[in-house]
Amino acid sequence: MSKTIIDTNFNFPNQKSVYKGKVREVYNINDEQLVMVATDRLSAFDVVMPKGIPYKGQILNQIATKMMTETEDLVPNWLVATPDPNVAVGHLCTPFKVEMVIRGYMSGHAAREYKAGKRSLCGVQMPEGMKENDKFPEPIITPATKAEKGDHDEDISREEILKRGIVSEEDYRVLEDYTRKLFQRGTEIAAERGLILVDTKYEFGKTKEGKIVLIDEIHTPDSSRYFYAEGYEKRQEKGEEQKQLSKEFVRQWLISNGFQGLEGQSVPFMSDEYIATVSDRYIELYENITGEPFVKGDISDIQSRIEANVIAYLSK
């Protein structure tokens, strides 16, 4: 098996604290910068799988940083540097406690809710007579509260966010505007590469100066769902499953093996062969969405590589 990075315990110069999320570990440097390490952990149904996926962290980090560069003319972001294939360094921000989920198509969670008879998602009405993977007349924003590690993200409406004071109305208007602009640009980038951006989520934070910026990942296979554009219409007409590039294939495999993150369920065994196929799918998505060949980082000793690269960057 290839070596993977599952957990980190770095002690960087001027480090104040470390926050460990589902798949990322964020180091606070002197209350000025954040060093975000993308691990190879795989999370599905808000549960972290027992084994890592080779190159997954590098793939997520490199897609996210590329997409931030390709959208920075529209929406300001937190990114300052990428000193290592698995690392992004950015401005210290206070994250908003909501994830801005936007859906162009009735897929995944929205489709599961629709099949269960619901026609409203996060306070947004979904039209009658839709089939799974149909395009919505307009993209819909369906926010989720950001869960702590181990908890489940929960759907929440705009009205509830404002009522509970999770985000001020003034700030929320900016989040909505940025979300729509990013999704439009992401849709255009995907189309250039023969893909459909189906749905995605964005996270935002506020800098010390009070500026709202895009943080975390953007347009990666963990935060987004993609379909291949070629054959989409025909597959819809025939009622066939769409050919997709996203983490949904992992979710479907888990569901078929009796796991949806519910109480009493245990994660099915993932063989080395299965994990290798997941890694290959992530590489396939990287190459499709970026239009560039994936260059594998040196994984002979990932921990030492990251530590050396980050310390060299911080000491500049």
Image (cartoon, rainbow, N blue to C red):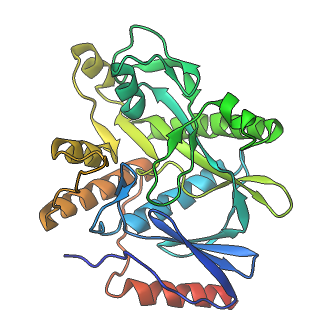
User: On screen, 128 above or below 106?
Assistant: above
In this rendering, would 271 be left or right of 174?
left
In this rendering, would 298 be left or right of 137?
left
**Closer-to-camera residue (167/28):** 167
Residue 86 is situated, as x and y percent measured from the top left of the image, at: 47, 72
Residue 249 is situated, as x and y percent measured from the top left of the image, at: 26, 45
Residue, far right: 209
In the image, what residue occupies the spot 74% across and 35% down? Answer: 162
User: On screen, 95 above or below 107?
Assistant: below
In this rendering, would 259 be left or right of 102?
left
**Closer-to-camera residue (56/143):** 143
- The quadrant where residue 245 appears: top left
**Closer-to-camera residue (156/10):** 156
- The quadrant where residue 89 appears: bottom right
Quadrant the C terminus occupies? bottom right
Residue 269 is situated, as x and y percent measured from the top left of the image, at: 15, 61
